[in-house]
Amino acid sequence: MKSKQNTQLCVTLHKGVFGGKSMKNKSMTILPIFFTVFIDLLGLGIIIPILPAVILNPVAGLLPMQYDFSLRTIIYGFLIASYPIMQFFGAPILGVLADRMGRRKILLASLVGTMIGYILFAIGIVTQNIWLLFLGRSVDGFTGGNISIAQSAIADISDESNKARNFGLIGMAFGLGFVIGPFIGGKLSDPSIVSWFNFDTPFWLAAVLSIINLLMVFRLFPETLKARKTGRVDLFAGIGNIRRAFGINEMRTVFIVVFLLTIGFNFFTQFFQVFLVGKFQYNQSQIGDLFAYMGIWIAIAQGAVLRPLSRKFSSTQILSYAVLLLAIVFPILLIPDNALWIYVIIPFIAILQGLIQPNSTAIVSGLSDRSSQGEILGINQSIVSLAQAIPPILAGFLTIINLNLPTLFAAGSTFLAWIVFINRFKKRSAGIEQSVKKVN
């Protein structure tokens, strides 16, 4: 009897000690995931002010002087699209491998690719080789599916009560990367601030930060996958994922909404800087400041606004209003003739997007079981990557017609997403609300 009591006591102590340790480990696990997403978005943010300067400005010397503005915007669009196109192929492969081999190994491998991509891009700028820029973005894009791995890891350590909140932390990393990336991209590429700053300087910094991120994941990130799942690695899995995404009845509508929302927001983020150059003659430093300002508001939305709203409203309810309001605000950007008014309008866009992104991801995650998180979020990333690749290619041609068209297309795609969401998705929300509960 005494032996049985001792055994029970040991079990109780074990649960108490290791249960607390597990909770601590979960908190520590979020740190390298947070930093990984931050570095990814830092790189994307750095690109924002620099690419218009090196591609659209003939003085930069990256393209032949005889190339006119129309041809330069088309090349600019394809260069931006190279990242999501390669991510479209890479993300599902990384997702399957992460489900089969574990999150940690694949995350480390993808971070090596990110570091190589930054180095290639920096060398391309130094040598004025446009093809190295394409190669650098392609390598980084193929391995850039690590966001879906980070999302899978978050899903591994989350339950239904804190999933949206934890995805909100990842969204906050997104926002911070969006703050610091454009800012340092604009400042570190400006030789008027420091004489040896150049367009390549921010990318060397990003490469160094990638190494730090690699070491952080190696030291702090434990394996979060409990049940491994076999899956076939296929280079063209992204194409199959698109077919599968729209063939899964219970998820088809949310994937359509995610697709349209991503198209809309990327028409804005990928070509609004061209609008700023064309209408207000912004330089890379001014573009960096504006997008950093927007990133601050995204971080505020996901770090401060999302939590109280999620306690009172479900993800479905938040999206019902935020998507419509975002579609309304986009065209307002085209009205001002004074650039200062842009700073008044941008916070509304940032806050709404800051609410939309984590809640849509939480819905996608909530509709899949734990054993398929990597696969489903990999499919979601394929949808996002395809949607990110379309706007810059189209916008490159649309800008030739009128500078306002990419922003108008952003509004139209977002409004269409709201129509689909309201008319079809909310009819099925009863089942979804059981999977995606309000955050406590």
Image: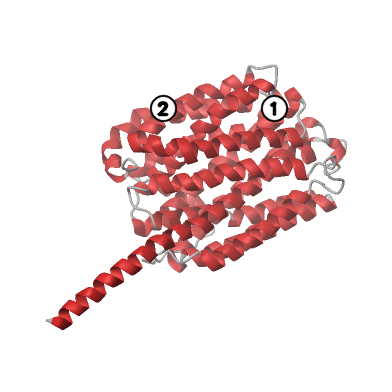
Q: Residues within 10 Å of mark 1 (few under 14, many from 20)?
A: many
The residue labelled by disc 2 is 321
Camera-side residue of 440 and 383: 440
Comes first in the chain, label 2 or label 1: 1
The residue labelled by disc 1 is 275
Marks counted in the figure total 2
Q: Is residue 84 above or below residue 9?
A: above
Q: In the image, residue 409 lies at what x, y percent?
A: 57, 27
* Residue located at (74% from left, 57% from top): 120
* Residue located at (32% from left, 49% from top): 160
Is residue 375 in sight in this rendering? no
Q: Which of the colour schemes (rainbow, by chain, secondary structure, one colour) is used?
A: secondary structure
Is residue 46 in sight in this rendering? yes
Q: Quadrant of residue 12?
A: bottom left
Q: Is residue 332 above or below residue 361?
A: above
Q: Regarding mark 1 in the picture, which secondary structure is present there?
A: helix
Which image quadrant: the C terminus?
A: top left
Q: Is residue 247 above or below residue 306?
A: below
In the figure, is residue 411 to the left or right of 61? left
Q: Is residue 248 above or below residue 264?
A: below
Residue lying furthest left: 1
In the figure, is residue 426 to the left or right of 174? left
Q: In the image, residue 398 lies at what x, y percent?
A: 66, 28
Q: Regarding mark 2 in the picture, which secondary structure is present there?
A: helix
Q: Quadrant of residue 139?
A: bottom right
Q: Residues within 10 Å of mark 2 (few under 14, many from 20)?
A: some
Q: In the image, residue 296 lies at what x, y percent?
A: 59, 37
Q: Say what amino acid the circle numbered 2 marks.
A: Tyr
Q: Say what amino acid the circle numbered 1 marks.
A: Phe
Which image quadrant: the N terminus?
A: bottom left
Instruction: Specify the label residue 147 is tagged with.
Output: none
Q: Which dot, 2 or 1, sits closer to the camera? A: 2
